[in-house]
Amino acid sequence: MAINVPKGLLAPEEINALKPQEREDYIRDVMLEILRRNEHGVTISEVMNTTSFNRVTVTKHLEHLVAIREGYKTERGIGTVYFKNGKLVRETDRFKVTCGNRMYEFFKLENPEGVFLYIQEQERDELRAINVKGGVMIPIRDAQQFLKGLIHFTSPEASMGSIAK
């Protein structure tokens, strides 16, 4: 099955001519755009067959997007399908907190797995560009319990014990 990829992808020799960090950023951005354009998800093989990227590169970048919660994956049959991590429930369902040169953006996202609170850690680099550093997804039904645990953990008298429901 053909997937929707961005037009005007760089040729392999152009990609190889980029500086290492530029190459990583370019491929990561292409992978994220592929996930955005394919609501029904993509497999590693589909991305490989539609781009010039090899299996190791595709796997590495898709797994990185999953790790920072920009994407998620599900097992389907004998393969893994990757998706862009949800859509905003409402455009007003976002909030940002700045702490020094780090930002934490909160989103309420919905995907086929349910509704989630997504907290994304971002950092401004020396060129003032914003880079996603990581994120956490919490089922919205568990958000209050998560907050109770966070308050308990950060309180002066906190112990390392678990939080009762």
Image (tube, rainbow, N blue to C red):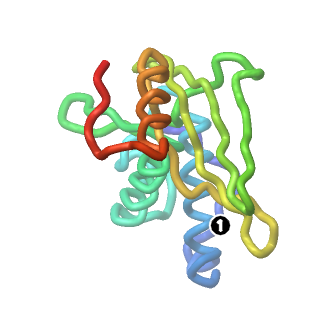
Q: Is residue 49 visible?
A: no
Horizontal side, residue 35 vs residue 47: left or right: right
Q: Is residue 81 visible?
A: yes
Q: Position of residue 41 (x, y in %)?
A: 45, 33
Q: Position of residue 38 (x, y in %)?
A: 54, 33
Picture quarter with the N terminus: top left
Q: Quadrant of residue 17?
A: bottom right
Residue 22 higher or lower than 85, as above or below: below
Label count reads: 1
User: In percent of the image, x 41 and y 43: which residue is there?
Assistant: 157
Q: Position of residue 74 (x, y in %)?
A: 32, 33
- Foreground of the two, 158 or 90: 158
Residue furthest to the right = 128
- Local packing at callout 1 (Cα closer than 10 Å; few below 14, some 14-19, many 20+) is few
Where disc 1 sits, the SS reads loop
> What residue is shown with label 1?
10
Horizontal side, residue 86 vs residue 47: left or right: right
